[in-house]
Amino acid sequence: MTETAQTLWIRHPLACADERAAGGVVVAGSRIVEAVPAGGQPSQPVDATFDASRHVLLPGLVNTHHHFYQTLTRAYSPALNKELFPWLTTLYDVWANLDESQLALASELAMVELLMSGCTTVADHHYVFSGALLNAIDQQVETARRLGVRAALTRGSMSVGRDDGGLPPQSVVQDEQTIIDDSQRLIERYHERGDGAMVTLALAPCSPFSVSRELMGESARLAETHDVRLHTHLAETEDETGYCQRLFGMRPLDYLEDCGWLSNRTWLAHGIHFNDDEVQRLGRAGTGIAHCPSSNMVLGSGMCRTLELEAAGAPVGLAVDGSASNDHSNLAEEMRQAMLLGRLRYSPGELTHEAVIRWATRGSARCLGRDDIGGLEPGQQADLALFRLDELRFSGAENPLAALLLCGAHRADRVMVAGRWRVIDALPCDIDLEALMAKHDEAARRLRAAL
């Protein structure tokens, strides 16, 4: 923020996720500079105001796990009604034919869909690198910058193919030196540090059953050297537990720790099948969990022990996961799913709508190692999501904040990223949605036809 930055008061929202900002927030440049109490006024004169009296104000939602490319294979008939391993083996043969133009469209559509749902920080776990996809992460960086969204991108990898007992076809498996060299290149070229970073890079071997022990260990060492984060899938299904026990002679979390990954540098996708001792170990380590409720339900994987993990000290965030197992990229809808699924494990008094909003904002930010996003406190980034309750689904709702989840909010009316409006009147700025969908649909058809 500079002294000449224009100030904007987003004033008197209908409701606010943070009671301390019940009168709205003042934005200058890319930051929040003041939280206004209920019925109050800013402490200093402002240059402009935005009337938020018909809006529910949230910090921008933060997604912690996705696979953008999977928007091309939603509701794909051969993969329907399958559990994780057969689902994966069916789709790997499709994904192996991805090219850069298809990935670019898939990434843009996924980011736009997330943005329209109130998500200001998008995350992706891309691990499919065929010969036609050598610059996948570079493309995603360019797309995120063009759209003006914050992006937590991960350099995924697979080094163990079907020839060696893994799940992916050999055409999308890379040798480990290629993976490490490209990981280092991407970190050095794109990873931003400090408050306000718009693009961050993490290292993300796909899963224990698709990379070697050596690659897991080398990734941890490289992350330590360059001070970046680590991400992978873990403990998603009981099949995975059995696989790790047969192959490594230990449970998935023991294997993770053996590879040097059990730390507060790491966040894990799914994290469902942990026992009591493992929950406590994760908490002591400060290892984050990206909770993916819709995907867990679609694949019948199980229910994450969210509240126990959080109580133990593990950051819990929210994620849409891939659009071939969800099958959407809507983080607002994911909040409702997280609340409903959670109440099959916990009582309504334990699993509240406030808890889920916390996961989707501050908890997700902690998973990504950030404290400059996910809240409405002065000094934090001006990443905001504003929802109107003017659809039939909200009519009669008394508690506006709870209505977002209970009545099923799915589309933000206004979204701000780093002090810039990126969604206005429920539409993304500078995006032709019809043209994007037409190009994306054609790319999906072409991908399916390549089989």
Image: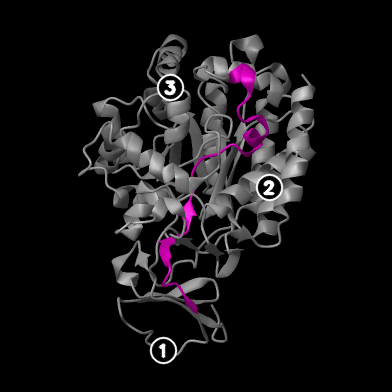
Q: Is residue 145 above or below residue 235?
A: below
Pinpoint residue 49: horizontal percent, then vertical percent: 49, 81
Identify residue for label 2.
Answer: 108
100 or 427: nearer the viewer: 427
Mark pair 2, 3: CA separation: 29 Å
281 displayed left or right of 295:
left
Q: What residue do we see at 38% from left, 40% from top?
A: 338
Pinpoint residue 242: horizontal percent, then vertical percent: 41, 12
Label whose residue precedes the other's in the sequence (3 or 1): 1
Residue type at numbered disc 2 = Glu
Identify residue for label 3.
Answer: 300
Identify residue for label 1.
Answer: 44
The residue range painted magenta reads 50-79
Residue type at numbered disc 3 = Gly
Q: What residue do we see at 53% from left, 42% from top?
A: 223
The number of discs equals: 3
